[in-house]
Amino acid sequence: MYNKLNKLREERANGEKGFTLIELLVVVVIIGILIAIAIPLYLNYQKGAKDKATQSDVRGAVSTIEQCFSDTGAYPTAMTALTAGAYPLTGCATGISVSTGTVMTFTKEDSTGATCATDPCAAYKIVGYNTSGKKAVSAATGFNYDSTKGGSIN
């Protein structure tokens, strides 16, 4: 019986194979490198997506402001933040909804480009930025739309 038990232990010891410490360390290092590459790419992708959402919000604001002009014959008098995601337009029946983190400003201008307080105002500018975005993190570097130039959002 004792010999049989020793024989079984010997067979088991010869048959067991496992990972060495070096092999386990190599796997951990490879996983660490992959994580170190993936996390910054993901965060960069997130910031780019927030910038795209802000650009889309500015385009939507242009459409809403132009609709307001068609309905009332004048641009809205002001855009004030009511909640985190909605901006009602004073003097219009509609408002502008924005994505999370987006900040948007609206200013009316006269024919010389100066800020216009009374109607009729000839033009307007919209500036939007996302507080967590990649490109635009303040009003100075935000996405701009100038109605005198029209076209795309810069």
Image (cartoon, rainbow, N blue to C red):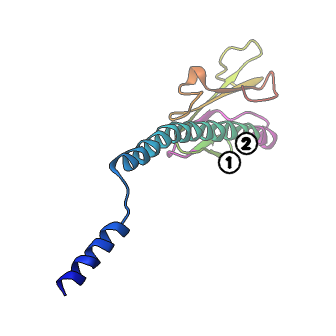
**What crowding class fits label 2: few (fewer than 14 Cα within 10 Å), some (14-19), or many (20 or more)?**
many
Question: In the image, what residue occupies the spot 61% across and 33% down?
Answer: 78
Q: In which quarter of the view is residue 68 placed?
A: top right
Q: Is residue 83 magenta?
A: yes
Quadrant housing the C terminus:
top right
Pointer 2 residue: 64
Q: In this image, 119 relative to 43: left or right?
A: right
- Residue 59 percent location from the top left of the image: 73, 38
Question: In the image, what residue occupies the spot 56% across and 38% down?
Answer: 41
Question: In the image, what residue occupies the spot 50% across and 46% down?
Answer: 83
Of discs 1 and 2, which sits in the foreground? 2
- Nearest the viewer among 139 and 5 is 5
Q: Looking at the image, tell me whether mark 1 or mark 2 is earlier in sequence order.
A: 2
The stretch in magenta equals: 66-86
Outermost front residue? 3
- Nearest the viewer among 36 and 98 is 36
Number of numbered labels in the structure image: 2
Q: In this image, 149 relative to 17: left or right?
A: right
Give the SS element for disc 2: helix
Pointer 1 residue: 94
Q: In which quarter of the view is residue 105 placed?
A: top right
User: What amino acid type should be assigned to the residue bearing mark 1?
Assistant: Thr
